[in-house]
Image (tube, rainbow, N blue to C red):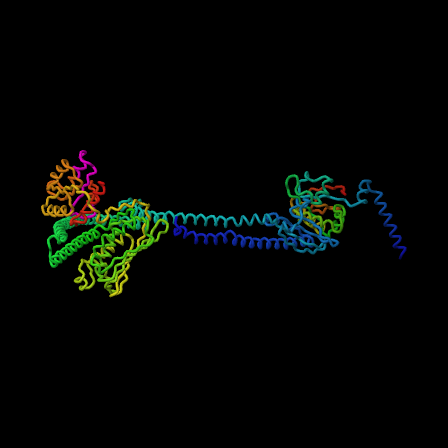
């Protein structure tokens, strides 16, 4: 029963009424009755004492005992008189002369005690004696008679109690319980569904009307629910259809992007490889300065196109799938050294200097996704170098270790053209490149900073930009990184410009002749003993029959692709499991690279591949072989 | 004149002596020692009490006859010639003891209320008309009561 129960609310007025009735019937009225009865008794005693005194006087003075005998009968029959006595004053002493009833005269313990009797006396003056008549009434008898008088009042109170209980019970049964039933029915509808049985007893009164209304409401709701269910089913079916279409469209889009990426990278590989080869052989070919400049410009444009393709792929992937971080124990110094190697070509002109400073980073291992952090830093340093004509780009890294966490603050400051406030506010919007002049002057897609912001958000950080137009910009962010247990500082990068002292035997499995052409040219440059296979089966036969230091295989080939080749190689017990096999593919997506590694490839090289990357791969093989 | 009265007196005494000496002995003793008491009651003669119980009746000690008839005592009032004698014979006490006795008795409910008569005739009449009544006469009983049960009694103390 809640505190807002009707019954509880009834208890207060019922209690007050009961208290008032109890006070009236058990105290006030009985007291009034008692007082009234007392007055009656005293009045009777007064009257009887007067009559008795007169009767005695008549009996003595007129010698007529008739009135005295009447008094005698009156006393005998009167219920409110316990005794009547004549006291005679003689010689200054009052002595009892006679008493009615007569047996009291023989009772030595009897005294007209005012504590025990209600009494009244009346004087007598006769020729025989003077004295008084005293009439008394036993107080216990008085109390007893008072109780008898009050008995109907007590019975009335009992009746009132009974009526109150009856009315309370009636209200409880006829009003409160049915209302609770109705509430329980509504609750059961809410908890058990609209089909829940309401358990409402049929009634003819207003409560019955309420119950009928509830049942009608239930029926109405059931009908409505049925219609809603049909509508919902129809909507769900339409949503399913639309979702399927959407997923199909998304899948088509992903496949399309993947295919476009692949199809763009493949010729881009040829273009970049061709231009790089031309640059490598410029001296041998006595290329003019103008031709050299044309080749260099073509190479820059091709690399810009590659960056654009990579950015587009990343952006669409983040937009559709979000950023998936793969944290691993990373040595901060190694990460910075690798970064320096990657961005070093951006500063080859010498007009802009790269400066990397760090504090408290020595020996610091943190749990972070190194590729994504590197991607952020490369993007920011690339942007800084792009908008800085002279001066420097400075990367500052400060680490602050507290307990098991390191707060690493990265700051990239340049002495470039800077930005106004509006441009700063809009930075990070997809495809925003500042004013049209910026776009024309510096190129790019405007996706780099957008990708950086998404990556930092995924690392629970945000990019802070401080810039003064014409003076330079500072991009900074802070990462809260868990300190990782000490790992083994083994760089996956071979030292730069390591001499290839040994002529390595390499098998290249590729179905496209143009790619075979460029691989031959690069192999010649790197003094590699190259064998070629134009299909997976052909390559497998070479592997089974010849010894190679390294196998490079394309993935997408007719009939059997590179993944089948690696499966055959790794499942063949006659082929050494130490054979280095590198997937060489235009599928640059992160997931695909992971997939290839899990299949048994030792590493993955993506198209377009620069001759430097091939050299590094060969150097690692040579190192492992040694 | 004086001698006449003295002579007449002597003659009266002598005559009275002659009468006394001429009467029977027992009658002489009664009449001369005290007045004759006669009990008169309006009841069956067989119910009349003996001499011992007379005093008890006069004092209100008996409330009914043996046949159940209520016993009412007719007492001499203060002006009645028998009053002092009755009080002297039956109610010994300080002051007017007869009335005090009966007031006490009737008030307490132990006795039936008595009737008071002012003279023997009235006393007789009251006895005659009141069934179960009782009176004590000193001397001759008036005629109307001659037919009632009566019993000459020696006076009880």
Which quarter of the figure has residue A576? Answer: top left
> Can residue A234 be seen?
no
Taking the image as shown, residue B87 lies to the left or right of residue A497, namely: right
Can you say which quadrant of the picture contains the C terminus of chain A? top left
Range shown magenta:
A566-593
Nearer to the camera, A338 or A426 = A338
Query: Outermost residue toward the left?
Result: A513
Nearer to the camera, A483 or A519 = A519
Taking the image as shown, residue A105 lies to the left or right of residue B22, namely: left
Q: Residue at x 27, y 54 (%)?
A: A457
Nearer to the camera, A313 or A360 = A360
- Residue B92 in magenta? no
> Can residue A50 be seen?
yes
Q: Position of residue A528 (x, y in %)?
A: 15, 44
Q: Position of residue A192 (x, y in %)?
A: 29, 45
Q: Position of residue B84 (x, y in %)?
A: 76, 50
């Amino acid at each position: 029963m809640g505190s807002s129960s009707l019954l509880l609310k009834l208890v207060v007025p019922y209690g007050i009424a009961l208290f008032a009735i109890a006070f009236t019937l058990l105290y006030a009225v009985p007291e009034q009755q008692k007082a009234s009865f007392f007055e009656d008794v005293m009045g009777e005693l007064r009257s009887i004492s007067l009559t008795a005194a007169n009767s005695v006087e008549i009996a003595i003075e007129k010698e007529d005992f008739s009135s005295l005998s009447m008094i005698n009968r009156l006393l005998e029959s009167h219920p409110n008189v316990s005794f009547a006595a004549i006291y005679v004053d003689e010689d200054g002493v009052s002595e009892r002369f006679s008493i009615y009833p007569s047996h009291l005269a023989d009772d030595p313990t009897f005294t007209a005690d005012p504590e025990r009797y209600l009494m009244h006396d009346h004087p007598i003056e006769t020729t025989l004696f003077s004295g008084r008549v005293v009439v008394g009434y036993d107080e216990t008898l008085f109390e007893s008679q008072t109780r008898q008088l009050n008995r109907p009042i007590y019975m009335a109170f009992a009746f009132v109690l009974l009526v109150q209980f009856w009315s309370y019970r009636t209200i409880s049964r006829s009003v409160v319980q049915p209302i609770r039933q109705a509430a329980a029915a509504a609750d059961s509808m809410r908890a058990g569904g609209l089909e829940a049985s309401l358990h409402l007893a049929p009634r003819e009164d207003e409560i019955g009307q309420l119950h009928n209304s509830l049942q009608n409401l239930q029926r109405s709701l059931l009908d409505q629910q049925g219609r809603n269910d049909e509508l919902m089913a129809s909507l769900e079916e339409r949503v399913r259809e639309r979702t399927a279409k959407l997923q199909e469209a998304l899948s088509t889009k992903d496949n399309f992007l993947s295919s476009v990426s692949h199809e763009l990278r493949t010729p881009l590989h040829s273009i970049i490889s061709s231009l790089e080869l031309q640059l490598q052989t410029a001296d041998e070919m006595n290329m003019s300065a103008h031709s050299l400049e044309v080749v260099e410009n073509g190479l820059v444009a091709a690399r810009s196109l590659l960056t654009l393709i990579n950015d587009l792929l990343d952006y669409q992937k983040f937009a559709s799938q979000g950023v998936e971080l793969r944290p691993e124990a990373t040595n901060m110094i190694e990460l910075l050294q690798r970064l320096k190697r990657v961005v070093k070509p951006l500063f080859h002109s010498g007009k802009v200097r790269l400066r990397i400073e760090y504090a408290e980073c020595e020996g610091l291992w943190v749990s972070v996704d190194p590729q994504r952090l590197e991607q952020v830093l490369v993007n920011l340093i690339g942007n800084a170098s792009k908008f800085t004509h002279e001066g420097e780009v400075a990367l500052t890294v400060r680490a602050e270790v507290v307990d098991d966490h390191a707060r690493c603050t990265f700051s990239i400051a340049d002495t470039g053209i800077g930005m106004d406030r509006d441009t700063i506010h809009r930075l990070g919007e997809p495809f925003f490149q500042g004013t049209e002049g910026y776009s024309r002057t510096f190129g790019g897609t405007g996706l780099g900073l957008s990708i950086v912001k998404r990556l930092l958000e995924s690392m629970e950080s945000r990019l802070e930009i401080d810039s003064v137009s014409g003076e330079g910009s500072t991009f900074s962010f802070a990462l809260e990184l868990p300190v990782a247990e000490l790992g083994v500082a083994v760089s996956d990068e071979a030292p730069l410009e390591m001499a290839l002292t040994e002529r390595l035997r390499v098998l290249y499995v590729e179905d496209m002749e143009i790619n075979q052409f460029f691989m031959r040219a690069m192999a010649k440059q790197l003094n590699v003993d190259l064998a070629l296979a134009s299909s997976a089966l052909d390559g497998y036969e070479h592997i089974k029959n010849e010894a190679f230091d390294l196998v490079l295989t394309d993935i997408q080939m007719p009939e059997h692709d590179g993944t089948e080749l690696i499966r055959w190689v790794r499942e063949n017990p006659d082929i050494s499991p130490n054979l280095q096999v590198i997937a060489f593919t235009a599928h640059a997506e992160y997931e695909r690279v992971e997939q290839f590694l899990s299949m048994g490839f030792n590493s993955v090289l993506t198209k377009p591949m620069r001759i430097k990357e091939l050299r590094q791969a060969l150097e690692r093989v040579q190192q492992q072989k040694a | 004149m004086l001698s006449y009265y003295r002579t007449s007196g002597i003659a009266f005494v002598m005559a009275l002596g002659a009468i006394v000496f001429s009467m029977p002995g027992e009658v002489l003793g009664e009449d001369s020692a005290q007045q004759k008491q006669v009990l008169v009651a309006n009841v069956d003669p067989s119910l009349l009490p003996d001499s011992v119980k007379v005093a008890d009746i006069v004092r209100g000690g008996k409330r009914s006859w043996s046949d159940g008839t209520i016993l009412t005592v007719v007492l001499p009032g203060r002006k009645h010639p028998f009053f002092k004698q009755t009080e002297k014979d039956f109610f010994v006490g300080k002051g007017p003891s007869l009335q005090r006795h009966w007031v006490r008795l009737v008030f307490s409910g132990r006795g039936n209320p008595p009737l008071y008569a002012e003279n023997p005739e009235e006393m007789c009449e009251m006895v005659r008309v009141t069934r179960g009544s009782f009176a004590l006469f000193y001397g001759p009983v008036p005629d109307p009561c001659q037919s009632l049960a009566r019993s000459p009694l020696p006076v009880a103390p």
